[in-house]
């Protein structure tokens, strides 16, 4: 006698060796002996042989129509052997009974299992729904096969256009379109990005990079929508500053948030005014405009364009534009003839802006050479020279040199419509760091941010500070020394139009000067709201800086294509990467021999991919050394002001001709805060150079 039994969710057969009522000893066709429970036995039979039963029953089961079988079954629960007798109309053979069992088991949507060998037909409504689902899956499988074939032929399926963003940036692997794309990628050997690009799904590499950033950081879009008018600040009652002020910025800057004034004090020296735009007078905490700034946290910069933290209408209210009298938060320094700061005073006043001076106008006439040879005649010559002398004295007192000679910032001039970025013409120029103008602005910003941070600390008013100790820079709500700058405390306050931390600190300072309760009052323990701002700001600032670096690399690669560059020269850095001459590109070159830092090499351009931002290079030769040390490590205080490259403003009402000067020297220090010391900037540069995101050359 033989048995058909179920074990491990499979049907098996065997010859009975011993029957112990509750269990049986059986021998399988393979010769393996095992003990099974009697309850697992589905059928006892004498013929055919155990090895033939399933072999003969399987093709017979395939001939049984599941729909007809369902029609034949009654509504109640049944055993397969009993149903087999009804179905065949006679006592079934072992093969027939087993065939019916296999047919029932293979049709779970028609028959629901109720135990070993027992079933119940599915109710009509449940069966109809299950069959509809089965048909849907069948059609979906056909659609996936069709879409995958179209993609492999580099034709975009009609289902894809509405889903391109999702497929590119946040693919849902449960969607048939995603499954088709994955299948096509596996068959073609291309990445999803490359395949979709071949199919024409990506309008342009520029649009791809911008769209990815916007979906991550601005999911509702970069616009501001409909906004109620900003409440006009009550500035008429504010005192009018005695001296007119002037700003120093790039040609395209519109968010002008700092300016300077100078008065001669006979017998004393000078009265120096550092004036900061005061949006904190109108943008109150929890107001709609504060909510906008709190969400964005900073202006986003990229070559040829930017996404402002505040709407243009708000910027227009407070920007220190020439010809206007603007509300300002002013720090007045009484400076002696030997440029010592004798005293200082802070107040909220109105400032007449006499001029917006521009770097491209000033630098040819106000530079290290003209200062040494004697300055010619130009507007604000005497004021600039005096402020430069004061800046030099301030730098000496800090004991931290801000000399950045040998370092450059990269300016991108994009001519054309960014809606068709691939047709734009890009020019990349270099501006040396460490000019007298750079030092002038940097040192006065350090003075203002340090003194105002000290005032808030003295009054026990909470604020957000930048601190540095043991080489590590951090943001904190407690005043602490900034070793890299050589100041006892440092609070960001000089860029309230483009950085939320500065706006928060400015409102704290305004309340302090007005003897009012600050928006963030001192409390026992930590101020969780300020900590939340710090956390969110650091995350946003890092994301914005990463995007900025990516877009700078995009335009640099575009320039290489535009100029049909086939070879490049580069200098080896201390971390083994290479800095390309004249461009903010840091590149790994595995094909180069082991070379010391400072060695110059020539590379051939093998491949440029604007979608992945990869530059494929091959080492050609090592050039004669020029004796210049590699500049991958910056001296102290290169980034010691709010006017540094990491935050240089890029403004243009017309993107057809916008100049951008925000590139860091090595395209890797943008996530260093602008005032931070070179030690941090260099550490961040090294981190970026060894990051997996850094494209490698051939």
Image (cartoon, helix red, strand yellow):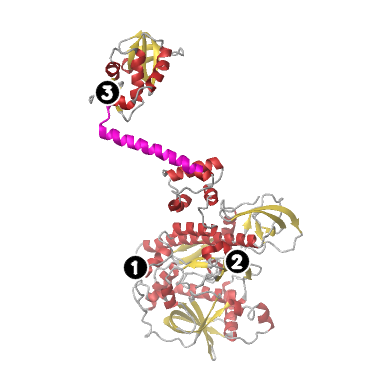
Q: Cα distance, mark 1 to mark 2?
A: 43 Å
**Badge 2, how many Cα within 10 Å: few under 14, some, many 20+?**
some
Q: Name the image quarter holding the N terminus.
A: top left
From the image, tell me which residue sits under label 1. Answer: 286
Residue 398 spot, x, y in % from top left: 56, 72
Residue 665 spot, x, y in % from top left: 61, 64
Toward which corner of the image does residue 310 lie, by quadrant?
bottom left
Q: Are marks 2 and 3 in contact (CB under 8 Å)?
A: no
From the image, tell me which residue sits under label 2. Answer: 425
Closer to viewer: mark 3 or mark 1: 3
Closer to viewer: mark 1 or mark 2: 2
Magenta-drawn stretch, dominant element (helix, strand or loop):
helix
Which element carries disc 2, helix, strand or loop?
strand
Magenta region: which residues?
120-149
Q: Cα distance, mark 3 to mark 1?
A: 72 Å
Asked if the magenta segment contains residue 138, the reply would be yes
Q: Can residue 238 be seen at all in this image of the molecule? A: yes
From the image, tell me which residue sits under label 3. Answer: 72
Label located before the other in sequence (3 or 1): 3
Q: Identify the residue at horizontal 33%, vertical 26% (top origin).
A: 66
Label located before the other in sequence (1 or 2): 1
Q: Identify the residue at horizontal 51%, vertical 64% (top origin).
A: 419
Q: Cα distance, mark 2 to mark 3?
A: 77 Å
Residue 411 spot, x, y in % from top left: 59, 68
Residue 208, placed above or below residue 456: above
User: Could you say which is closer to the camera, residue 176 or residue 505?
Assistant: 176
């Amino acid at each position: 006698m033989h048995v058909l039994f179920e074990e491990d969710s499979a049907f098996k057969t065997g010859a009975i060796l011993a029957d112990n009522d509750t269990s049986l000893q059986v021998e399988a066709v393979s010769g393996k002996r095992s003990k099974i429970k009697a309850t697992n036995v589905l059928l006892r039979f004498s013929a055919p042989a155990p090895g033939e039963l399933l072999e003969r029953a399987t093709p017979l089961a395939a001939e049984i129509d599941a729909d007809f079988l369902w029609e034949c079954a009654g509504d109640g629960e049944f055993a397969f052997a009993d149903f087999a007798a009804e179905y065949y109309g006679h006592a079934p053979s072992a093969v027939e009974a087993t065939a019916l069992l296999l047919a029932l088991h293979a049709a779970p949507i028609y028959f629901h299992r109720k135990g070993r060998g027992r079933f119940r037909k599915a109710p009509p409504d449940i069966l109809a729904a299950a069959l509809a689902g089965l048909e849907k899956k069948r059609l979906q499988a056909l659609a996936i096969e069709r879409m995958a074939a179209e993609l492999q032929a580099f034709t975009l399926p009609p289902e894809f256009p509405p889903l391109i963003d999702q497929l590119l940036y946040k693919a849902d692997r449960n969607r048939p379109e995603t499954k088709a794309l994955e299948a096509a990628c596996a068959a073609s050997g291309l990445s999803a990005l490359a395949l979709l690009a071949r199919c024409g799904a990506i309008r342009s590499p520029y649009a791809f990079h911008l769209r990815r950033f916007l979906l991550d950081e601005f999911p509702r879009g970069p616009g501001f929508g409909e906004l109620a008018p900003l409440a006009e600040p009550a500035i008429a009652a504010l005192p009018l500053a005695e001296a007119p002020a002037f700003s120093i910025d790039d040609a395209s800057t519109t968010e002008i948030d700092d300016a300077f004034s100078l008065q001669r004090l006979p017998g004393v020296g000078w009265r120096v005014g550092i004036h900061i735009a005061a949006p904190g007078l109108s943008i109150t905490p929890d107001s709609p405009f504060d909510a906008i700034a709190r969400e964005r946290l900073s202006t986003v910069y990229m070559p040829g364009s930017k996404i402002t933290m505040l709407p243009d209408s708000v910027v227009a209210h407070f920007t220190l534009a020439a010809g206007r009298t603007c509300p300002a938060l002013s720090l007045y320094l009484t400076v002696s003839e030997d440029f010592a700061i004798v005293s200082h005073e802070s107040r909220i006043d109105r400032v007449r802006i006499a001029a917006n001076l521009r770097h491209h106008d000033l630098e040819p006439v106000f530079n290290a050479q003209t200062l040494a040879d004697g300055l010619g005649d130009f507007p604000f010559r005497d004021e600039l020279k005096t402020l430069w002398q004061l800046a030099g004295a301030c730098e000496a007192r800090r004991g931290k040199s801000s000399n950045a000679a040998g370092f450059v910032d990269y300016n991108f001039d994009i001519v054309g419509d960014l809606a068709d970025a691939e047709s734009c013409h890009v020019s990349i120029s270099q501006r040396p760091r460490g000019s007298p103008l750079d030092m002038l602005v940097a040192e006065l910003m350090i003075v203002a941010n340090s003194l105002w941070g000290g005032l808030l600390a003295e009054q026990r008013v909470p604020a957000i500070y930048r601190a540095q100790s043991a080489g590590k820079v951090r943001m904190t709500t407690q005043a602490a020394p900034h070793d890299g700058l050589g100041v006892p405390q440092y609070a960001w306050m000089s860029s309230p139009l483009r950085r939320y931390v500065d706006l928060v600190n400015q409102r704290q300072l305004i309340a302090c000067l007005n003897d009012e309760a600050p928006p963030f009052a001192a409390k026992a323990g930590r101020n969780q709201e300020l900590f939340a701002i710090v956390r969110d700001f650091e995350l946003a600032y890092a994301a914005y800086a990463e995007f900025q670096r990516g877009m700078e690399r995009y335009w640099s690669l575009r320039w290489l294509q535009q100029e049909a560059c086939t070879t490049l020269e580069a200098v080896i850095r201390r971390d083994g990467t290479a800095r390309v001459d004249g461009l903010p590109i840091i590149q790994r070159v595995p094909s180069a021999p082991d070379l010391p830092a400072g060695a110059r090499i020539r590379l051939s351009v093998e491949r440029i991919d604007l979608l992945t931002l990869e530059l494929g290079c091959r080492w050609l030769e090592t050039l004669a050394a020029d004796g210049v040390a590699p500049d991958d490590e910056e001296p102290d205080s290169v980034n010691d002001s709010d006017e540094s490259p990491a935050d240089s403003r890029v403004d243009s009402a017309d993107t057809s001709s916008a100049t951008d000067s925000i590139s860091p020297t090595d395209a890797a220090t943008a996530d260093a805060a602008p005032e931070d010391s070179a030690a941090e900037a260099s550490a961040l540069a090294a981190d970026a150079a060894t990051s997996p995101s850094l494209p490698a050359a051939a």
